Image: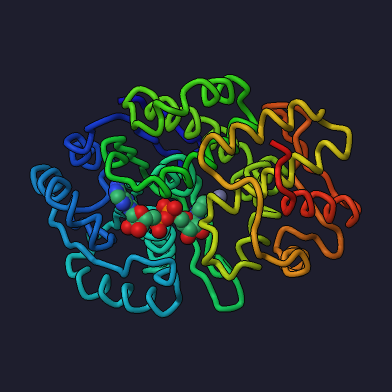
Amino acid sequence: MRIISLSLKKRSYDIAVGSGITGYFGRYLNKLNLGSDAYVITNAPVKKRYGQGLEKALKKAGFSVRFKLIPDTEKSKSIERSSLVVRDVAAYDKKRRLFIIAFGGGVVGDLAGFIASIYKRGVPFVQLPTTLLAQVDSAIGGKSAVDLSEGKNLVGAIYQPRLVFSDIKYLSSLGPRELRCGVAEVIKYALIKDPALFTYLEKRLKDIFNLDTAAMEYIVERCSRIKAGIVSRDEKEERGLRTILNFGHTAGHAIEAASGYTKYSHGEAIALGMIVACDISRQMGFIDQPLQGRIKSLIRNAGLPTRIERVPLSGIINAHYRDKKFIGTRNRFVLIKGIGRAKVTENIPLKIIRQALEQLQKRDPS
Ligand SMILES: NC(=O)c1ccc[n+]([C@@H]2O[C@H](COP(=O)([O-])OP(=O)(O)OC[C@H]3O[C@@H](n4cnc5c(N)ncnc54)[C@H](O)[C@@H]3O)[C@@H](O)[C@H]2O)c1
Ligand SMILES: [Zn+2]
């Protein structure tokens, strides 16, 4: 088991990464002294597959356990669902020694973090992520939120977990689409911060999709380290450092919104967003065409989309201007000046953005 620490003074916490480590989870929790009653928020498929193992580990360490199932859909990230769950938490919290465990992907993690942050003005919570996306990204850094019909992630808080416990074993049952979604975020980390990870991905994509344990451990550990480093230095996105984690997300979110959140998964939209960001980087003279091509090949080889179909350009541009990453009327993009070198850039001319989006609609010459 590898331990990465995310330093935030008194709120520092560990990120544990390893394969088959759930047996140690209870002992780890005991050391943290979070409470005696584990309230586990999860969904039916995750509980069915892995609930027993978790329950055993928790009970063996002396905890009482209650599973709370939420529907397996992004729609669970809502105020309505939160209020249902939070009332159930209050009913269970008889001894006042409750802590919350988020056991699932990003949807469960975001909702559980939000509930932990509002119940009694904050109770301890722990992330036990079960998707690649959650292990490399959403479980780390404390961003929790629910969606409104007006937009995604509009209500929430930055509320840090007390532990992130990433057991690679859980990833073995992920479907190929979920796996690709996580790989898109891994490519993001490589592009903004880690040239060695980029080369590794170029060489070892096959191993990753075959769920090779060493390869999965490597990518989860690398990404966790990068995110922990960034969040430690800029937890609240006040110093412009955390912003680089939004690489590919400006256009990506616009594509998700313009396609009604159904056509593309988050990772697929982010893959397209990274292609847009790379094209803007090239048009600005930050990177050259061969490098742009190399990045696009990696994204394509990962089975992620590199062009969009049937999403009108005007819809994407309109969604883009409503995005919360806009500051006033200025736009702000995370671009790259090479692999591993992110640069936040404002005021990109609309013509350049439009051209970058247009090339997404073109067929590749190959
Ligand atoms: N808080 C953050 O910093 C942050 C960052 C990125 C994304 N997010 C949020 O994360 C969410 C997406 O997360 P996600 O991609 O993990 O989606 P998800 O939570 O919907 O999980 C994807 C699917 O995988 C299933 N699943 C989970 N674990 C499994 C396992 N081990 N085996 C088989 N199937 C499993 C789930 O039941 C679900 O059907 C979005 O709501 C997004 O807004 C948050
Ligand atoms: Zn993302």
Viewer-proximal residue among 210 and 328 = 210
Q: What residue do we see at 50% from left, 63% from top?
A: 145
Viewer can see residue 215: yes
Residue pictured at 85% horizontal, 49% vertical: 346
Apparent side of residue 33 relative to residue 143 in the rendered image (left or right) = left
Q: Residue 304, position in %: x, y? A: 54, 44
Q: Is residue 69 above or below residue 40?
A: below
Quadrant in which the N terminus is drawn: top left
Which percent across, then down, holds residue 36?
18, 54
Horizontal side, residue 177 vs residue 363: left or right: left
Q: Is residue 109 visible?
A: no
Report x, y in % for residue 167.
29, 37
Pick whichever, 175 or 49, lies toward us.
175
In the figure, 192 relative to 118: above or below? Answer: above
Residue in front for this viewpoint, 215 or 311: 311
Residue at the image position 20 percent from the left and 56 percent from the top? 47
User: How was the colour assigned to the protein in this rendering?
Assistant: rainbow
From the viewer's perspective, is 202 left or right of 68? right
Q: Is residue 286 above or below residue 100?
A: above
Residue 191 against residue 334 in the figure, above or below: above
The image quadrant that residue 75 belongs to is: bottom left
Depth order, front residue of 86/336:
336
Tally of marks = 0
Q: Residue at x 87, y 50 (%)?
A: 352
Q: Position of residue 251 (x, y in %)?
A: 70, 55
Q: Quadrant of the C terminus?
A: top right
Q: Is residue 125 left or right of residue 286?
A: left
